[in-house]
Image (cartoon, grey):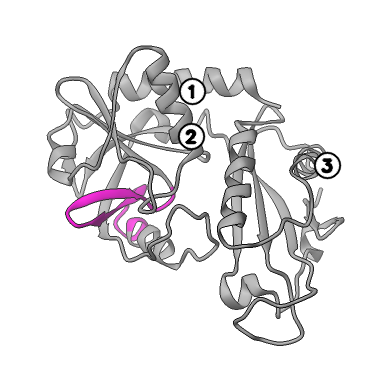
């Protein structure tokens, strides 16, 4: 069965899902995206993703072409039409297609809204048991990383460097500190059992999974400290891990070829992953 996508009001076969070459997402990366996980046919933590979508489009003065309620209806219909059990729903909204290429915002142009699904067994992923290696790269991105922009070239280069190194992620470094991963939030567990992750700000994307994991940890009276940390501190830590909608909680067992802890997923990362999966299933829509 061919997958179904959504393009500007219509559900169409994925092979027929197209937008104009004049679309500003293509020409200028003038758009915002979100990725929501699906477990057992239901959307995970979707309210958080849609709230971040609203914030991001607001920051670039881009109006959504549909209400948030309607966007969730479309997501659910895509999941149903594609008979998706476990995977992801990708959503992108751009400023639309004008009659030419002009940097200034066009007038009277309706924004573009596209969505599609992909299959992925996040819970049963082999790397959940083995952990991943990460490499470090300079953070060369723009200064508004809190906006979930489709301008992802720096992340593409970082993730390609990781792939070529046989690593599962790249941690980006600025002023000697870790900002975040190419598509994830970065965490460590210090020797005195404090969970550390960088504080929200314009330097990082406010991760939805990060937000949920921090809240779940604090509910269980685990110590959480939101601040920047260095690679040296990460290598001296008991554990390291990442969070994202596409991996949930994923242990990091080595950084630039050097072991973190004993080089195996630690009990904190494993426990937080279990807690998050329980939360995800209990709150899915």
Q: Name above or below for residue 189 compared with residue 90.
A: above
The disc placed on residue 209 is 2
Check if mark 2's residue and mark 1's residue have beta carbons within 8 Å.
yes
Is residue 262 left or right of 179 when viewed as pictured? left
Mark toward the start of the polypeptide (3 vs 2): 3
Which quadrant is the C terminus positioned in? top right
Residue 169: within the magenta? yes
Residue 197: within the magenta? no
Residue at 57%, 44% (x, y): give it: 52
Residue at 68%, 59% (x, y): give it: 93
Residue at 39%, 12% (x, y): give it: 220
- The x, y position of residue 142, in whole percent, is 39, 66
Residue for badge 1: 276
Mark 3 nearby-residue class (10 Å; few <14, some 14–19, many ≥20): few
- The x, y position of residue 41, in whole percent, is 72, 30
In front of the other: label 3 or label 2?
A: 2
């Amino acid at each position: 069965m061919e997958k179904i996508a959504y393009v500007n009001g219509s559900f169409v076969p994925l092979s027929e899902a197209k937008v104009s070459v004049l679309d500003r997402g293509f020409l200028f990366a003038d758009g915002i995206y979100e990725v929501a996980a699906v477990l057992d046919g239901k959307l995970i933590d979707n309210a958080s993703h849609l709230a971040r979508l609203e914030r991001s489009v607001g920051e670039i003065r881009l109006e959504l072409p549909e209400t948030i309620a309607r966007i969730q209806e479309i997501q659910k219909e895509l999941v149903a039409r594609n008979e998706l059990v476990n995977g992801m729903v990708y959503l992108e909204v751009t400023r639309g297609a004008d009659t030419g290429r002009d940097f200034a915002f066009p007038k009277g142009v309706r924004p573009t809204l596209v969505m599609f699904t992909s299959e992925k067994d996040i819970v049963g992923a082999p790397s959940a048991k083995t952990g991943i290696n990460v490499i470090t790269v300079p953070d060369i991105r723009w200064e508004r990383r809190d906006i979930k922009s489709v301008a992802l070239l720096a992340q593409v280069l970082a993730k390609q460097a990781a792939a070529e190194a046989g690593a599962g992620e790249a941690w980006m470094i600025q002023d000697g500190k870790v900002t975040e991963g190419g598509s994830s939030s970065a965490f460590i567990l210090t020797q005195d059992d404090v969970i550390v992750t960088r504080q929200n700000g314009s330097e990082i994307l406010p991760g939805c999974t990060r937000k949920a994991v921090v809240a779940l940890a604090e509910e269980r009276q685990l110590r959480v400290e939101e601040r920047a940390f260095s690679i040296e501190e990460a290598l001296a830590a008991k554990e390291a891990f990442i969070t994202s909608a596409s991996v949930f909680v994923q242990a990091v067992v080595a950084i630039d070829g050097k072991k973190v802890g004993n080089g195996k997923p630690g009990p904190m990362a494993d426990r937080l992953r279990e807690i998050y999966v329980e939360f995800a299933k209990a709150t899915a829509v």
